[in-house]
Image: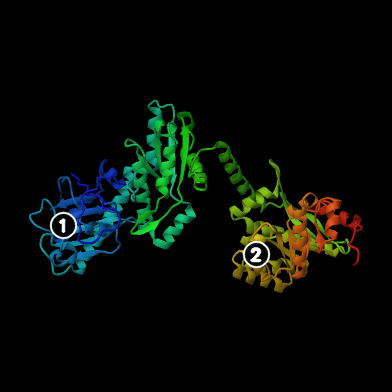
Amino acid sequence: MRTTAGTIPGRHAAGHQEAASAAAPSPTQAASAEGFAVPGFDAVVRLVTRSLGVPLVSLVLHGGTAYWFADGNELPAHDPRTLHPLYLEAARSLTPHVVLDTLKDERFRDAALGLASAPGPIRFFASEPVCTLTGQQIGALCVMDLAPRTALNESERTSLRDAASLVGAGVVLRSYLGRTDPITQLPHRYAFFDDLRKHLQDGAPHAWVIAIDVAPVQRFNAFIRAMGHAYADELMRAVASRTMAWIPADTRLYQVGATRFAAVLPDRHVIEDSSRLDDLVARLRQPFDCLGIPLTIQPGVGLLKINERELRGGDPLRLVMNASHAAQHSVRGWAVYDRQQDEQQRQEFFLVTELAAALTDRTELDLHYQPRVDLDSGRCVAVEALARWQHPTLGLIPPSKFVGLAERAGLMRSLTQWVLEHGVAQLAAWRRQGHDIRLSFNVSSTDLGADLVGRLRQVAEQHKVGLDMLELEFTESTLMEHSATTRRHLAAIRQLGAGIAIDDFGTGYSNLAALRQMPATSLKIDQSFVRGMGTSRHDEAIVRSVAELAHSMGFRVVVEGVENPDLYDSVLGMACDEAQGFHIAHPLPSAEVVEWLAAHRGMLARRPA
């Protein structure tokens, strides 16, 4: 027989005994209702009983479930059972406990450590943490005696440690065999799939699957880095407990991932009243008290309606995870699976893998170049390199789509390197032909590191191009973030002689205090303001005032988005140095740039004052 001790939530003052909880069962209590059989545990009990000479042995799991043995035999159930706080303290601590005589310990002054079937109080107590093979604690192996002791020698301590290791390995083995997670004791995803199939094969026309994501992966990893695995394990148990109190009594909860739970809900639970989902999110957004430290999580609840035909060959967990992931970033906190959104994400994943291949294939990616003219002379003084991707089956993929994907997928450094190498090689060819122009190209925040200086120098030396012929464009937001580190890297780039442009100015932080400390050489006014000058006097005032301010601070001012003659005439009358836009030239393939330069006789220039 097994005996389940009551769960005492949170931390408890020593010396106070609490009755079994009448609240909803904890995950471990629910698991114990289906049986708990650690492979070989009976042999471990006999080993400990003989080697330490103790009559009483107990395995106490983290949530408070306890299994008791006397003289090697499992004790009959005692109902109800109270659990002294020392057992929970041992089950939740990575430190072994040894109490040689409980009557001489202040923790037992008000509440003796007793056992209903024992003729007297327990006088000797020792425990050793029980951990999984990965080091995650799941409870403690406790040994007890009715007689006090004067010491626990090293050989006995070693025997207790070895026994606890065997129990930990047995619990993990039991989890694999019994389809349960060793930390929460909840059935895992293989059990979920088996039960979902049975549910649909038993005649149900469809099933509603719910998934609960505890926190985004990066945030959960931050919990572990800051507090350790024991804290994260306790959080998962606490989330499971709240979720089990919400789902119907006859519904099972499964742990289907490191930070994810799932369940199969009856129709009435979803269709009749969606406010119940609001209630679940509200419960999960309430702070959790884990090991005495409060924490607020960022849960996401996803829902998926699925039938047996859709289950065959499908992956409902992937689909519902798509919804729970989206829900984490929504105000409501829950979302129903959206097939169109899922297809978009699958397409993005496909594009990421294709982009990674394209970066090694020299034929799909190309650079187009958009000229910039000097407003004083009307002459082309620079070109901006812009990446283009011609996919063999999907056609032309716009930069607005694949550049963002590259940043999210960690491919931005490779893409920037590709642009740098090909752009500088092309610039060297043009300069050998006598074209005195500079090259500018965009650089992501992920590239702004110590190795960028070395990469610039290496490519410039390889193609024999002066670094003063290069200009790196960073967005305003990138330059204003992490200013101390940013300024150090920018200063190193400027020491090489390369120019630095603040791109899209006016759409980010617009922090003038930080702006004056940046070693930038140029400021590019965002095209959204320039395009609006023809219809909005406010936009014209913004462009004029920003240009005057930047010019007075020593920046070379470049105006983007000059798309018609009227806009060009307007910027001629402002404190601007260069202009770029469709009125001057569209982005051109490299083969057309030389022809454009030859045909370009100069734009209308600013009249001398």
In three-dimensional space, the C-alpha distance between marks 2 and 1, rounded to whole angstroms, equals 71 Å
Seen as rendered, the residue at the extreme left is 119
Residue corresponding to mark 2: 511
What residue is rendered at 18% in x and 58% in y? 143
Looking at the rendered image, the quarter that the C terminus falls into is bottom right
Q: Which colour scheme is used?
A: rainbow
Residue 566 in view here:
yes
Q: Nearer the viewer, residue 364 or 28?
A: 28
Few, some or many residues within 10 Å of mark 2 (<14, 14–19, 20+): few
Residue corresponding to mark 1: 49
Residue 95 placement (x, y as % from top left):
28, 64
- The image quadrant of residue 31 is top left
Q: Give left or right: position of 387 versus 249.
A: right
What residue is rendered at 38% in x and 31% in y? 199
* SS category of the residue bearing label 1: helix
Note whether 191 is above or below 66 in the view shown: above
Question: Which amino acid is tagged 1?
Answer: Thr
Note whether 226 is above or below 358 in the view shown: below
Number of marks in picture: 2
Q: Give left or right: position of 39 versus 472.
A: left
Residue 462 in view here:
no
What residue is rendered at 59% in x and 46% in y? 349
Disc 2 to disc 1: CB gap under 8 Å:
no
Question: Which amino acid is tagged 2?
Answer: Asn
Residue 303 placement (x, y as % from top left):
46, 38
- The image quadrant of residue 579 is bottom right
Front: mark 2 or 1: 2
Residue 50 placement (x, y as % from top left):
15, 58
Note whether 455 is above or below 419 in the view shown: below
Seen as rendered, the residue at the extreme front is 537
